[in-house]
């Protein structure tokens, strides 16, 4: 079974540019999450999809961030325009729905974003 | 609102010594509690979880944690550290029936030969 995959692993962009991060969850996982870790800080929740619907987007920092999950499969997180404070590691995770949620999130390796 | 506090962002232990990583939580309802581990250049993986059964939870690689409601704690322990335990450990909490998981700041464990 393939794990959660994220692309790119590292992206370096200039302030004001656009970046799109992609996440492919584990096949069959309806739940998909985006988290972000700014250096030295905790891993912060950004949003949660159930299939293609946004279940909770309370952690999205502002309207420069747009997440989509068309067709309920892979997801993209676009930052436009990027600011310096957007630098960090963006983690994607997925989880099953059947059997109830008991907290096991399956994480990708993360996409490191550096904004110069 | 739920939160976790991890005491000590860096912990160093000698190989063979006891590992103790501290975590205190705050939750308005009975929580689910977790420890995740991140090895270098890898994603986070679940080490163990408390969901309501036994208060002493055993996880992978010889780790265990004890849920203490009176102390609102969920400390992670391992009797004897191994070099391969060097990693970053995250305590996390979620409310039952709600799929949002809140993480602590993480504790980097260094194992000294």
Image: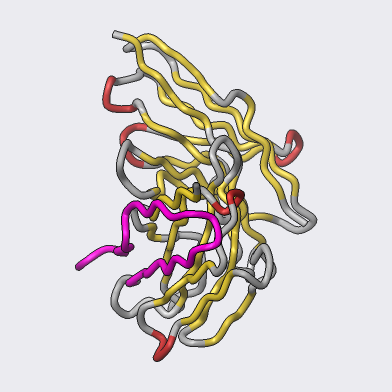
Q: Which image quadrant for residue B9?
A: top right
**Residue B59 in picture, x, y percent from top left:** 39, 42
Quadrant in the picture for the C terminus of chain B: top left
Number of numbered discs? 0
Q: Nearer the viewer, residue A18 or B92?
A: A18
Give the image location of residue B45, x and y in percent. Answer: 37, 49
In front of the other: A113 or A6: A113
State the image coordinates of residue A1 (x, y, percent, origin top left). Answer: 20, 68
- For the residue pair A14 and A23, the one nearer the viewer reads as A14
Question: Image point 75% across, 52% down: which residue?
Answer: B27
Q: Residue at x 33, y 12 (%)?
A: B16
Question: Is residue B75 on the magenta stretch?
Answer: no
Residue A18 left/right relative to A85: left
Name the quarter where the N terminus of chain B is drawn: bottom right
| Residue at the image point whose x is 62% and y is 58% from the top | B94
Compared across the picture, whether A42 is left or right of A70 comes to right
Whether residue B65 appears in this view of the structure is yes
In the image, is residue A32 above or below residue A109?
A: below
Q: Give the residue displayed 59% in from the left and 59% down from the top.
A: A45
Q: Is residue A48 above or below residue A106?
A: below
Q: Visible in this render: residue B53?
A: no
Image quarter for residue B83? Answer: top left
| Residue nearer the viewer, B39 or B77 | B39
Q: Is residue A18 magenta?
A: yes
Considering every residue shown, the one lying at the far bottom of the view is: A71
What is the magenta range? A1-24
Question: Colour scheme used in the picture?
Answer: secondary structure
Q: Position of residue A3 (x, y in %)?
A: 27, 63
């Amino acid at each position: 079974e393939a794990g959660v995959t994220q692309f790119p692993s590292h992206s370096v962009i200039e302030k004001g540019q656009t970046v799109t991060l992609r996440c492919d969850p584990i096949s069959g996982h309806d739940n998909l999450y985006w988290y972000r870790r700014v250096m030295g800080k905790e891993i912060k929740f950004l949003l949660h999809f159930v299939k293609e619907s946004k279940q909770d987007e309370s952690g999205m920092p502002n309207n420069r961030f747009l997440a989509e999950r068309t067709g309920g499969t892979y997801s993209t997180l676009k930052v436009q325009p990027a600011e310096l404070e957007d630098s960090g590691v963006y983690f994607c995770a997925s989880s099953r729905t059947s059997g109830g949620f008991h907290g096991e999130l399956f994480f990708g390796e993360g996409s490191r974003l550096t904004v110069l | 609102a739920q939160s976790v506090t991890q005491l000590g962002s860096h912990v160093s232990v000698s190989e063979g010594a006891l590992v103790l990583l501290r975590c205190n939580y705050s939750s308005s309802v009975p929580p689910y509690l977790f420890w995740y581990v991140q090895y270098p250049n890898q994603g986070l993986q679940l080490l163990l979880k408390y969901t309501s059964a036994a208060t002493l939870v055993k996880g992978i690689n010889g780790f265990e944690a004890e849920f203490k409601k009176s102390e609102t704690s969920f400390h992670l322990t391992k009797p004897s550290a191994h070099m391969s335990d060097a990693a970053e450990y995250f305590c996390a909490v979620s409310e039952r029936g709600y799929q949002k998981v809140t993480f602590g700041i993480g504790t980097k464990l260094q194992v000294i030969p």
